[in-house]
Image (spheres, helix red, strand yellow):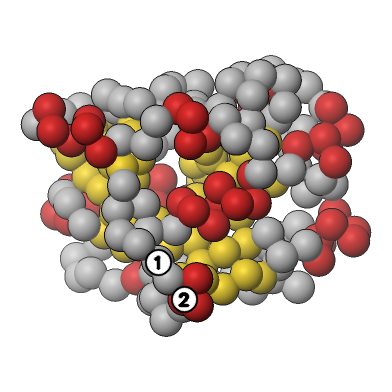
Amino acid sequence: MPNPYFYLMVLPESFYTRADVVQIARELLGKKLVTVIDGELTSGIITETEAYAGPIDRASHAFGGRRTARTEIMYRNGGVAYVYLCYGIHHLFNVVTHVKDSPHAILIRGLEPVDGLAKMMARRRKEQLTPLLTSGPGALSEALGITTRHTGVSLQGPEIFIQQGIEIPGKDIIAATRIGVAYAMEDALLPYRFYILDTKFVSKGKGL
């Protein structure tokens, strides 16, 4: 279990409840995502994010104000996890932002491992450390032990929390189009994906 000082560095709820989901997605780069699952601490530096701007964003699960049993969590106050299953296989971890009834979210797409490497490799059934360990949203969720049972949990811990990490200079942040959202028409062209320049721990897919 983490020492108490870990929680002194946890991002406050006010970080997530701001209105600009795109700015928050940029600012999450370099932050440290930590999980304590079944007593096992694992963590990594966030290297890639995607912003989804709720009802006005055709790529968002909440476009047009859509509300389903799965997406209802997006309408909560910012600072909770939204985890959904993709293709019935991959658990994708999102950070809910903005305030109640404003369903913004940020998909965490890439992570550079820091703590609990052996556990992450065991979860991913990997024998050697390569970027494939935590590159891509499904991979990083598996490595960190995040599943759909964590949807709705607070990002203040104790199971999942995000800490202050390392400062990423603006010149080292790349803005690009999101991956796998061609169906969103002109919204697919929005530069809402952000990643750290020259890192190997990013998704293999490409935007438009």
Residue 71: quarter of image: top right
Residue 98 position (above or below residue 45): above
Q: Residue at x 90, y 59 (%)?
A: 185
- Within 10 Å of disc 2 (Cα), the crowding (few <14, some 14-19, many 20+) is few
- Within 10 Å of disc 1 (Cα), the crowding (few <14, some 14-19, many 20+) is some
Q: Position of residue 72 (x, y in %)?
A: 67, 20
Q: Is residue 151 visible?
A: no
* Residue corresponding to mark 2: 172
Quadrant occupied by the N terminus = top left
Mark 1 lies on a secondary structure that is loop
Number of numbered callouts drawn? 2
Question: Which amino acid, mark 2?
Answer: Asp
Comparing 60 with 194, the one in front is 194
Q: Residue at x 57, y 30 (%)?
A: 17
Query: Does residue 176 appear left or right of residue 36 in this picture?
Result: right
Q: Position of residue 59 (x, y in %)?
A: 78, 48
Residue 82 position (above or below residue 163): above
Marks 2 and 1, how far apart at CA: 7 Å
Q: Spot the residue most to the bottom.
A: 198
Q: Position of residue 70 (x, y in %)?
A: 66, 24
Mark 2 lies on a secondary structure that is helix
Which labelled disc corresponds to residue 168?
A: 1
Q: Residue at x 49, y 61 (%)?
A: 48
Q: Position of residue 100 (x, y in %)?
A: 66, 19
Query: Does residue 180 appear left or right of residue 167 in this picture?
Result: right
Q: Residue at x 57, y 64 (%)?
A: 194
Quadrant occupied by the C terminus = bottom right
Question: Which amino acid, mark 1?
Answer: Ile
> Does the residue at mark 2 contact the one at mark 1 (Cβ under 8 Å)?
yes
Residue 163 position (above or below residue 102): below
